[in-house]
Image (tube, helix red, strand yellow):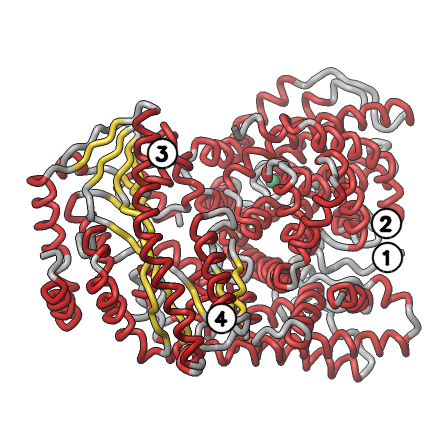
Amino acid sequence: EDLVLPSEVAATHWKTDYQNEFAQMVDERTNGEISVKVFPAGQLYNEQDALAALGTGAVQMVWPVSVRVESIEPATGVINLPFALSDEMMANECFAKGLTGVMSSYVEPRGLEILGLLRTADLFFIFKDDEVASMEDLKGKKVRVTGGRVFLDTMDRLGVSSVSMAASEMSTAMSQGAIDGVFSSPAGWAEMIGMTGKYGWYVPGFSLSTYAVVADKAWFDGLPAEHQEAITSSLDEISKRQWIDAKASDDAAIQHMIGQGAVFHVADEAESARWRQLADESATSFTEAHPEVMAQMAELETTCGVGG
Amino acid sequence: MLFEAFNRGFMDRSFFWAEEGVRYLMIWAFFLTIGAAGRGGYHIRTEMLVDMLPAGLRRVCNLLASVAGVGFSAVLFAASLPQVYRYYTMGMMTESNLDLPMWVLFMAMPIGALLMGGYYLGCLIRAWKGAEPFGAQPGAGATPDAAPDAPPEPHASEDRT
Amino acid sequence: MTVALALPFALLFLAIGSHVAVALGLVAAVLLLWFGGVPNTVIAQTAFKSVNSYALMAVPMFVLAGNLMMRGRIAELMIELTGSLVRAVRGGLAQTVLLTAVFFAAISGSSVGSAAAIGASTVEGLRRDNYPPRFAAALVAVGGTLGLMIPPSLSFILIGSIVGLPVDKLFMAGILPGIMEACLLMIGTYVMVRKNGYGRRAERPDWKGFGQKLPRALPALMMPVLVLGSIYSGFLTPTEVSAFAAAYAAVLCLLVYRSVSLRDMWDTARVSLLQTTMIFAVVMGGSLVGFVLARMGVSAQLIGALEAANMSPWVFLLVVNIALIILGMFLDGIALIVLTAPLLFPAATALGIDPIHFAVIMVANVEIATLTPPIGLNLFVMSGISKIPVHEVARGVVPFYGVRMVGLALITFVPAISLTLVH
Ligand code: NA
Ligand code: NA
């Protein structure tokens, strides 16, 4: 049986490496009875379309950025709220598993299932000419960002004007002054922007984004128990290790930029507290609209003894 | 688009929905006018070989080419309906804050496929009667005849040899 | 194997006069459904996705801008203006036509649009000036192709949206090759005119007439400056520029020159929409073919074969050029791009060829494809305008093929021409 796993990142991207590893593990654990077919670089589908194809029989699994799941069920936006996650919280197995379950419960009525969460990156601001080191410095800046409703609202409150633009255009746009900065990942800084963006401004946990491992529920439920087990155990193993590896390589990318002469500021405790407060305010529309998922998150944190 | 550029350039504001709105309008316009573009004679094809054939064979080719059009419309129609239905059950929305259900957007395709199928059925009937099925039809779209000043469009490429 | 079987079918459908979009789309869809083991919704999504692209949204507006400038008789204005000076060289009118072609290339995205705009107002004049009809038609047909290389260009937009390259960089890359091609054409034309005694003898340049005509032509002359300038400065994205170009053309034709009525405007908008639909339909059919190639692993096999053959990039480019020239005889430019880009770009990139350079090479081939029989859109258009048979236009183009080959060779083997402005 085929497990079609499309993705839109390049064949050389680390996500593809993990997907190939997943393919190999599942192959071994099911004695080749499930054959995972990875289609990187949008060869088959981009991830939004792949998500829509789950349940038609064309695709069985996708690992999109969690934000994409919001287009199906807005309540899942809870993990994309600022400061919703941290590396420490996700290191707690009770929390990580519980969170995956909560997320999954929201998409299951739509015929989907979430089997795991991987670390994408903890995003931060990168500016060409502005040495930003506090909220106030951001006012009036034109920054390229990617979607996320609560995130956009937070930007509004900060007085940042959000600009939508293809990733391939952002470096040029910044060097020509069409935008002042971008909100991007450590890898994006090191590989796509380089010293065009000399100033980094990082508020840890403000936008720790994840990949959700989404599967076709009817298909998954129809598998024999040992095949289900092979898939979930492989994913558990990969996600636990991936979380640590991804953090380490992000740190390395930042160190690389600093080595090149970049200026990198990290918010201290007091500044971070102000960001949390602002983020809470801009999340009110979300928390009011989805009280049930907020309660579930709070309960999870208490049960597992994390965050707060 | 201009509006967005204006806002980005002069008012430091950018609307995510502007880009999407234009895109979705264009998608609808495209699917709804595939048939109309056919009636106006705009779709490109190679008539050179067919025109060299004797009338009987030419009619066979025209019939086959029309059937191909009907077939492609049917494939698009049959393929898009389940996807529309899946979008509906999944409840996926468009990405921006336009908050448009994807199934509404995707409806352009089955509707467009129906219109397109209707056009090619018309071609089939014309071909059956032994007429030229794909030429610009009178009164369908602004053809060179309707606009004497305009140079011929690409479709007006009957071989003059 | 199945793919190899499908190719003759696709060609058969094209040969019996199927619409290109239908021939491509149907063969690809049947292949996917019967042999690919692919659920039919994949076809729907692939077809939908192919037209759901921000870059493609530049197409309708550039088509509209080009059609408006054509309808608004802007070409005559340009020809009168440049003609008053260029008549100082032997065969001045031929050179004027080429200069006007460059001007149109810089405001119009298509080759057919450029050729049609210039052709309508020059073919008669060229004949009166002692140029053979065949040469006159060929000159305009060849000059029109510059519209594909010099930005804005629908070819680059298509490549950008199919392969996922930034359109603004592709536009930038086309500037120098386009200018180089224009220069080569002017030199070639000069030689032909001298050798065959075409055209009038040189006259004194009419500076006074030039001065009188300049103010009236200035708003039109500003258009390429504004279009290229806003792309180059990065102030507008190519899609936004297209909207700007259409708006500027509308103001020019409706208000400044008053050469287009509101009714004409409505007609032109309709025509532009339907032409855009035609382009999108071919893109949709081609995207299904591209999907088949990827899904059945043809692209990967090609890359594997290239690696196994240990082919050098230069040999690869030579082979690709020959293949594109042959395919280009039978396919029009849009179909050529949508069919070959998904296959060739991964292969070229795997060999270390800069994709932007490769895009310029591909566009140079598309220019040639619009000029080669049996299917060459510019030949058809010029046959229609100059009322001479297609094969006569093609015979007229023959000497220009040599010029085009020199240009293609330079573009292919001197990457700097394409890449200097980009990197
Ligand atoms: Na152009
Ligand atoms: Na050709």
Dot 4 falls on a residue whose secondary structure is: loop
The residue that disc 2 covers is C388
Q: CA distance from mark 3 to mark 4?
A: 37 Å
Q: In front: mark 3 or mark 1? A: 3
State whether residue C208 is above or below residue C266: above
The residue that disc 3 covers is A174
State whether residue C390 is above or below residue B117: above
Q: In the depicted view, which residue is nearer to us: B42 or A211?
A: A211
Q: Amino acid at mark 2?
A: Ile
Place of residue B66 in the rendered image (x, y in percent of width and height, measured from the top left): 73, 76
Q: Chain of mark 1?
A: B
User: Is the C-beta of the residue carrying label 3 under 8 Å from the nearest atom of ligand 1?
Assistant: no
- Contact flag, marks 1 and 2 (Cβ < 8 Å): yes
The residue that disc 1 covers is B160
The residue that disc 4 covers is A59
**Residue A238 lies in what quarter of the image?**
bottom left
Dot 2 falls on a residue whose secondary structure is: loop
Q: In front: mark 3 or mark 4? A: 4
User: Is the C-beta of the residue carrying label 4 under 8 Å from the nearest atom of ligand 2?
Assistant: no
The residue shown at (77%, 18%) is C203
